[in-house]
Every structure is written in C-alpha cells, then in structure tokens.
Image (cartoon, helix red, strand yellow):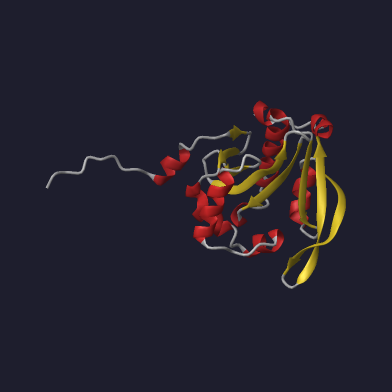
Amino acid sequence: MAKDTRPVVDDHDAEAERELSWRAKSVGLAALDTDDAELMHGWRSDPVIVHHLGVWPRSLTAMRERIERDMDDDDRDDFLVLLPDRTPVGHVALTGQNLVDGTARVELMLAAPHRGQGHGTAALDALVDLAFGELPIYRLTAETHSDNAPALAVLARSGFTQEGISRSACMHRGRRHDLAVLSLLRPEWEELSRPRAWDA
C-alpha cells in the first residue's frame, strides 16, 4: 500500500492563517463566514447571552442561513473577534448603516469563557475605530437591557453615553424589559485619549 504523502492539515494552523479585516492591539476582527455558524450557534445558546440579548436558540441550519443572508446585506458588517493567537472570543457587528445620515448601530456578544478580561472593550473600541476611521459615520448607537451591568460598563468604557430608556421595549421570560439607549458621536470619539486601532 502506498504511503499517504498528503500534508496533514491542522485546524488550529488553518484558523491561525485566517485573514483579518481589521487589526487592533489585543484583538483582530475577521469577517464572519458561514463556517462560523456552529461557533455562533453555541454562543447564542448560552443562557446568559439568551437572557441579555432576549433571544432564544435557533437551529444550526437557521444560524447558517442567517449568516448567509446577513453577508448579502450592504447595511451591516459582522466580525468574529479573535485574540492574537486567533482564538475566537466573540462577535461584533456594525448594523443599520445609513451613510447618508451617518448613523449605525453596534452589537457585541462575548463568549462565556472570555468575559471579564477586557476583550469586550477592546473589540468594541476596534469596531468604533473602524466606523469613525473608515466610514462617514457621525453617530453610533447601542441598546441593551437596562439591568445588563456588564454591557453598560463596556459601552461606557468605550465612550458611549446613556441618553435614555426605551420603556418596556422588549419581551423576555414572560415580562417586559426596559432597554437602555446609548450613543457615541464622532466629536466625542475624537476627544478620546486612547490609541486608535491603527496605532496598535
């Protein structure tokens, strides 16, 4: 029997070679792909994420179809958040982009094992720098449950200001929840003293 001389493909090496769309000091952003559906499905099945996002787990097939649909949406950009060793730790997105009005929304989801380590702030900072540094965006907004203290803290560290409450704006676990509405304007971003992603 002939010896198999084909090179062995290491999944970790393949992931390590993944092209980054945007690079910052401690994280990189790679465009979300359908191959990430299983990873995203697992994250969105986490009870904490389910509670704070007000979502419920869907099938893997539905997740794959959603990613495919979103990839064709010119008004949004979805990214996998990767550490320098290419470990995936979360997902960020710039959605509802209106380049005429200069507005967009930010979304952030961090995997359970990687919370509380500063990765959420690093990822959000990178996304904000992408929005203001490469696009004619003037106003970014974010929404989260008003009792989601970790998300509110991350948004505050990235410069967002809470501007109001959408009362009883979503239904989850049999009761209504308020949503905190936050925003960050271009002049406020320009005044932030932190290094920009492209300086890292």
* Quadrant of res 134: top right
Residue 160 makes an appearance in the image = no
Total numbered circles: 0
Q: Position of residue 185 (x, y in %)?
A: 82, 36
Residue sitting at the far bottom: 174
Q: Identify the residue shown where x is 74% and y is 54%.
A: 150
**How far from the left and from the top, in percent, is residue 165?**
86, 55
- Return the residue nearer the eye: 126 or 115: 126
In x, y percent, where is residue 162?
Answer: 85, 48
Residue sitting nearer the eye, 163 or 13:
163
Residue 118 picture quarter: top right
Q: Is residue 187 above or below residue 60?
A: above
Left of 32 or right of it: where is 128?
Answer: right
Quarter containing the C terminus: top right
Q: Nearer the viewer, residue 99 or 29?
A: 99
Residue 30 is at least partly visible in this image? yes
In the image, taking residue 162 as reference, residue 50 lies left or right, namely left
Q: Residue at x 59, y 37 (%)?
A: 28
Q: Nearer the viewer, residue 101 or 83?
A: 101
Going 63% across and 34% down the picture, which residue do you hit? 24
The residue positioned 67% from the left and 31% from the top of the image is 197
Taking the view exactly as shown, the residue that stands out farthest to the right is: 164
Residue sitting farthest toward the top:
199
